[in-house]
Image: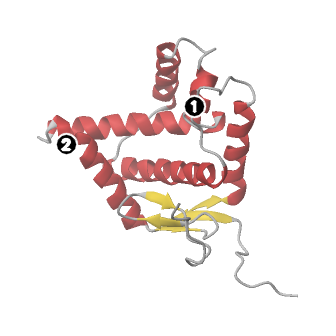
Amino acid sequence: MLLTGCSQSNEAATVGDFKITQTELQSSIDAVMAERKKVDTSQMQLETGDELNRGQLRFKILMHTFDEIAKELDLEITSSQVVARKQQISQSLGGDAELPKNLVNAAIAPQDFDTYVRAILISERITTALAQSGVAEADVATQLGKLLSAKAKELGVKINPRYGFWDTEAGDVVAADVTGGAVTPSAE
């Protein structure tokens, strides 16, 4: 028996030639869920289900996009810079004991923390360059967002339909209407 319409690959998404596997994505999701069991989440508003899946996929797409921008702009981020910033972040949160709770709240898997910190460092370099080039401080974040969206569009983001689709304007993974419009919310 042959099933059609199902992806035969293990790809959750591709960003240009870069592949994000479903296995890699699920590993991050599983790690986030496991870390939640270790901290008090009662006061947190956390993503769950498909929302968590899309959030983790968005994270991986954007982190790779930051890496591609860094390559294009010849920005070098060293491992010692990442370590120093991780220590700085940890201290600003109240020490290493508080870090896990904050990673859970931000839905960052422990194995993705270095990647996240690297993206912060790249973002800071870009925002500094934008400000030095005359972009108004109030517009820097918007310009950074436009740069990320443009780079993702240039690279070409393709999403496995099980996760939704890539909205190039918003730079986000959007849930697909898997019912074809057959199911709509009640007007009540």
User: Which residue lies at the image location 72% right of the left edge and 47% below the top edge?
Assistant: 27
In space, the residues marked 1 and 2 are separated at their CA atoms by: 27 Å
Q: How far across and how far down the image is residue 95, in percent?
A: 56, 12
The amino acid at mark 1 is Asn
Q: Is residue 16 visible?
A: no
Q: How is the image coloured?
A: secondary structure
Query: Seen from this angle, which residue lies furthest bottom?
Result: 1
Residue behind mark 2: 139
Foreground residue among 139 and 118: 139
In which image quadrant can residue 2 be found?
bottom right
Assign the N terminus to one quadrant of the image: bottom right
The amino acid at mark 2 is Asp
Query: Seen from this angle, which residue lies furthest right?
Result: 1
> Vertically, is 158 above or below 134?
below
User: Which residue lies at the image location 43% right of the left edge and 64% below the top edge?
Assistant: 167
**17 to the left or right of 65:** right
Q: How far across and how far down the image is residue 67, in percent?
A: 44, 48
Residue behind mark 1: 105
Under circle 1, the secondary element is helix
Q: Which mark is residue 73?
A: none
User: Which residue lies at the image location 52% right of the left edge and 69% below the top edge?
Assistant: 158
Under circle 2, the secondary element is helix
> Vertically, is 87 above or below 148?
above
